[in-house]
Amino acid sequence: MVTHILAATDGSPAAEKGVAFAADLARQTGAALTLLAVKDEGFVTSSIPSVPDPENPGVPETAEDYLEQLCEAALDR
């Protein structure tokens, strides 16, 4: 039985279709749905966890806003 679905998106149209499919599947099965936004930053060699960029503090809010929009769109389907 499916109890939790993780859907990743990079903002591409194909990924957003995948999020919509995951939302439909979660609705049909009663599973929890977690959305993950990813951005390619190239190859990273450091093992130090990522920290917010003081030069661009709005980035996490932008990602959060994007995920909120995806959630609202999924709920409206």
Image (spheres, rainbow, N blue to C red):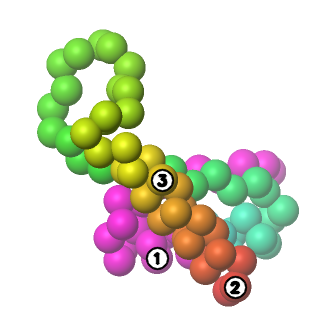
Outermost residue toward the bottom? 77
Q: Which residue is mark 1?
A: 17
Local crowd at mark 2 within 10 Å, few (<14), some, or many (≥20)? few
Q: Give the amino acid at mark 2.
A: Asp
Asked if residue 15 lies in the magenta stretch, the reply is yes
Residue 76's disc is 2
Q: Nearer the viewer, residue 21 or 42?
A: 42
Local crowd at mark 3 within 10 Å, few (<14), some, or many (≥20)? few
Bounds of the magenta segment: 1-20
Instruction: Tell me if residue 23 comes above or below residue 51 in the rendering.
Output: below
Q: In screen coordinates, is 54 left or right of 67?
A: left
Q: Give the amino acid at mark 1.
A: Lys
Tell me the distance, in whole angstroms, between the alpha carbons under discs 3 and 2. Answer: 22 Å
Q: Nearer the viewer, residue 53 or 73?
A: 53
Name the quadrant of the C terminus: bottom right
Residue displayed at 72% across by 49% down = 4
